[in-house]
Amino acid sequence: MKCGGILKLTERLLTIADLCKDSKAVIDVGCDHAKLPIYLIENNIVERAIATDIRQGPVDNARKNVVANKLEDKIRINLCNGLADFGPDDGDTIIIAGMGAEEIISIIENAPWTKSNDIKLILQPMTLEYKLREFLYKNGYEVSNEEIAIEGPKIYTIIRASWTGAQLEEENFNLFSNKLYNGRNRRTYIEKLIKRYTRMQEGHKISASGEVEELNEILAMLNDTLDKMTKE
Ligand SMILES: C[S@@+](CC[C@H](N)C(=O)[O-])C[C@H]1O[C@@H](n2cnc3c(N)ncnc32)[C@H](O)[C@@H]1O
């Protein structure tokens, strides 16, 4: 794997790159410096990429890095809001990483062409991942797997989903993805979630009683899972 210079990716971006192994063409929305598309091309993981961002500064940085790596023929740089300039022929995989869940949801909502079985979404929300999960499930996008990346005190959730049209009625989309995440960091993941939800429960953010009940449920389920793991 090439990973020197600007291509030195963090654990979070490496985990996302790993999920692109069966992709051919990716659209990296909010590409910033375009590190991820450059890495994906340099390591022959995908054939072509679009690196797009809503701000001129990141677009300029992305272009500079793509040119420095002589990848202009494989990586197209673009300036637009979300997926506004694109359609299904532009890529089989859409990466939206390093943004809040609400921004990610809005980008997907504004691109109804992502409702296709042929398109894979790789999403890494910085906040409120349960909201993103809920949105996906309620709108027919099925989560095929979840990964986590741990960087020091930070824990990142990476969700891979595709539209199937199936709508989950009464699933645990508000909870953490108990069934899906079974990787080596599972215990750490659950412990961190318990800390996070306990903080939320104690914090001022909670005003509606429904939310408190929901958090109680989440915590009970997480603690139960951890107990079971300890006994195994
Ligand atoms: C924190 S950076 C994340 C960069 C990279 N994706 C990563 O995960 O390391 C967020 C980037 O998303 C861009 N961004 C935010 N909202 C966007 C939108 N609606 N459409 C495109 N880019 C957006 C920002 O300009 C910024 O460059």
Image: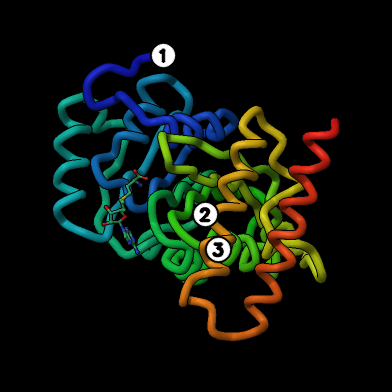
Residue identified by numbered label 1 = 1
Residue identified by numbered label 2 = 88
Vertical placement of 42 versus 229: above or below? above
Q: Are marks 2 and 1 in contact (CB under 8 Å)?
A: no
Percent of width and height locating residue 135:
61, 68
Left or right relative to 96: residue 121: right
Percent of width and height locating residue 123:
51, 50
Residue at the image position 37 percent from the left and 62 percent from the top = 82
Q: Are marks 3 and 2 in contact (CB under 8 Å)?
A: yes
Count neighbours of disc 2 (C-alpha within 10 A) and say few if under 14, some if 14 to 19, many if 20 or more: some
Residue identified by numbered label 3 = 113
Q: Nearer the viewer, residue 92 or 198?
A: 198
Pair 1/3: label in front? 1
Q: How many marks?
A: 3
Percent of width and height locating residue 33:
24, 41
Q: Amino acid at mark 1?
A: Met
Q: Amino acid at mark 3?
A: Trp
Vertical placement of 165 versus 27: above or below? below
Q: Is mark 2 within 8 Å of ligand 1?
A: no
Residue at the image position 23 percent from the left and 27 percent from the top = 6
Q: Is mark 3 within 8 Å of ligand 1?
A: no
Separation of disc 2 and disc 1 at Cα?
Answer: 29 Å
Count neighbours of disc 3 (C-alpha within 10 A) and say few if under 14, some if 14 to 19, many if 20 or more: few
Q: Nearer the viewer, residue 57 or 26?
A: 57
Q: Quadrant of ligand 1?
A: bottom left
